[in-house]
Image (tube, grey):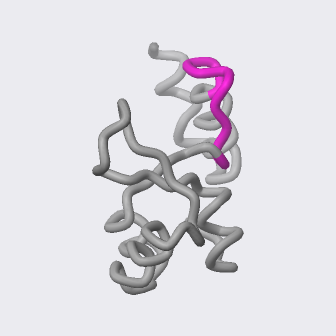
Amino acid sequence: MDELTAILPRLTDAQIEALISVAQTMVDPGRSRDDEAFTASQLAEMSDLPYRSISAAMHDGRLPYKTPHGQTRPRYATRRDFEKWSGKRLP
């Protein structure tokens, strides 16, 4: 742990992001950043699009979504599907 603490201050932001990406892949190898799922309210906060527009797109089927265990809510859209639908890149 001391070695990690010693090198972290010298890493660039890009290197830290790459390190996080590798760590996430190690935790769940089948999941990529594009497969991250967000609720309509989370997407609204990150994209500055109105919640109602995102929710309506999910409801109408324009924005594909998934629900956990066959429930009706909450609805989760993947980063990839949202960016394709909205034309905006998420942070």
Q: Quadrant of the N terminus?
A: top left
Can you give x and y, in whole percent of width and height, for residue 52 in the image? 34, 82
Residue 87 picture quarter: bottom right
Residue at 64% from the left image edge and 60% from the top image edge? 81
Between 9 and 36, the one nearer to me in the picture = 36
Residue 10 picture quarter: top right
In the image, farthest residue toward the top: 1
- Direction from residue 21 to residue 75 in the image, left or right: left
Residue at 38% from the left image edge and 57% from the top image edge? 39
Between 80 and 29, the one nearer to me in the picture = 80
Q: Is residue 55 above or below residue 42?
A: below
Residue 26 is inside the magenta segment? yes
Residue 35 picture quarter: top right
Residue at 58% from the left image edge and 21% from the top image edge? 28
Residue at 62% from the left image edge and 78% from the top image edge? 86
- Direction from residue 64 to residue 45 in the image, left or right: left
Can you give x and y, in whole percent of width and height, for residue 84 in the image? 71, 69
Can you give x and y, in whole percent of width and height, for residue 48 in the image? 43, 84
Can you give x and y, in whole percent of width and height, for residue 36 in the image? 55, 45
- Direction from residue 62 to residue 68 in the image, left or right: left
Q: Is residue 53 above or below residue 38?
A: below
Residue 35 is inside the magenta segment? no
Between 21 and 13, the one nearer to me in the picture = 21
Q: Quadrant of the C terminus?
A: bottom right
- Which region is colored magenta? 25-34
